[in-house]
Image (tube, helix red, strand yellow):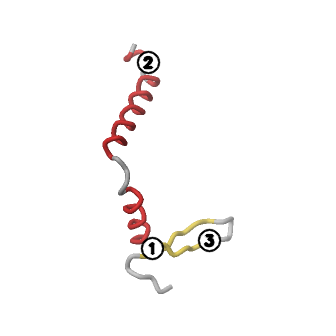
Amino acid sequence: MDLKPSEEMFVMSAGKEIIVLKKVDVKKIMEDIIEKVKGVDLGALEIKIGEEGNKIAKKKYQKIFS
């Protein structure tokens, strides 16, 4: 299979008798993710997540928040 230390096999079933193996470079995936999130404003994301969480909580627990 010739796997590098940063690679793993992704196993997926494609039917009753078929298994698909895909070589995945985990290090490359993580590097891509890091590069993509470099421009994300974490403060704004934190506020957005908090607002969404509050909205869900108010909807789910209406008796508490009324």
Question: For the residue labelled by badge 2, is the local secondary structure a helix, a strand or a loop?
Answer: helix
Q: Nearer the viewer, residue 50 or 1?
A: 50
Which residue in the structure is indicated by mark 3?
A: 19
Residue position for label 2: 62
Q: Which residue appears at 39% of the width and 76% of the height?
A: 6
Which amino acid type corresponds to the residue marked 2 in the rendered image? Gln
Which amino acid lies under the numbered mark 1 shown in the image of this protein?
Answer: Asp
C-alpha span from label 1 to label 3: 19 Å
Of circles 1 and 2, which is in front? Answer: 1
Image spot of residue 24 (x, y percent): 48, 72
1 or 3: tag closer to the N-terminus: 3
> Would you say the residues marked 1 and 3 are in contact, meaning their CB atoms lie under 8 Å apart?
no
- What element does badge 1 sit on? strand
In three-dimensional space, the C-alpha distance between marks 3 and 2, rounded to whole angstroms, equals: 47 Å
Quote the CA–CA distance across marks 1 and 2.
Answer: 46 Å
Identify the residue position indicated by label 1 in the image: 25
The numbered mark at residue 37 is: none
Q: Residue furthest front?
A: 39
Name which of mark 1 and mark 2 comes first in the sequence. 1
Q: Earlier in the sequence, mark 3 or mark 2?
A: 3
